[in-house]
Image: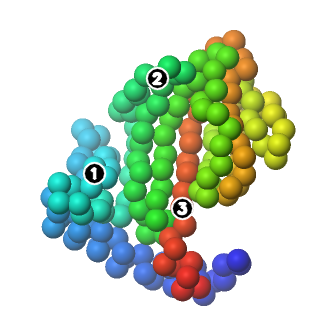
Amino acid sequence: MTMTRRDALAGLMALPGALSAGTATAQATGEAASQTAGGAQKPANEQNSIGAQKPILGPTVFHWDAMKPVKSAVGSHASLCQQATATLDQLEMHVGTLNPGEMSHPPHRHVNEELIILREGTCETLSNGEWVRVEAGSVVFNASNSLHGFRNVGPWTAVYHVINWSPNKAMAAAS
């Protein structure tokens, strides 16, 4: 599907209404995003106690020093957000670390597309049926429903960022 200038303009014109609707929902449910000491927003919880959805994610800054990694058997994981945006049903972002010789999880596939940005270390990614070596600064794109995996083949801990998204089905159906 090709996006036309008309599609882009229509999306931009709809954005203020979508963002204000998200703000109204947040205020109504008491789940508005909180502010950090530096003034950046922190995303609200996934749902409130009565099951209302999170507000649409607006402009947000995720400060490196404010990330809260949770240790795992293979490294650690710091979740940044998992919620809808003006154009996506879900945007999920996290920062992971992977200990030497470890795999994030077995090769798998899912409908969501994702990017992996390797910040530090040397890894391999399963891409198009082959394990491909990636160095710090490399970007990996995992297409929808493609079998993929990620493993640390270097001598030190790898640090990587994951951005995973699902398109807004209502917007896709309207175009």
Q: Quadrant of residue 83?
A: bottom left
**10 Å crowding of disc 2: few (<14), some (14-19), many (20+):** few
Q: Residue beneath label 3, please?
A: 166
**10 Å crowding of disc 3: few (<14), some (14-19), many (20+):** some
166 relative position to 103: left or right: left
Label disc, if present, on residue 44 of the rendered structure: 1
Q: Earlier in the sequence, mark 1 or mark 2?
A: 1
66 relative position to 33: left or right: right
Q: Amino acid at mark 1?
A: Ala
Q: Earlier in the sequence, mark 1 or mark 3?
A: 1
What is the C-alpha distance between the residues marked 2 and 3?
26 Å
Residue placed at 65% from the left, 49% from the top? 109
Instruction: Identify the image quadrant of the N terminus.
Output: bottom right
Judge by depth and name the residue closer to the eye, 143 or 69.
Answer: 143
Q: Residue beneath label 2, please?
A: 72
Q: Where does residue 161 sit, x and y in percent of width and height?
A: 56, 38
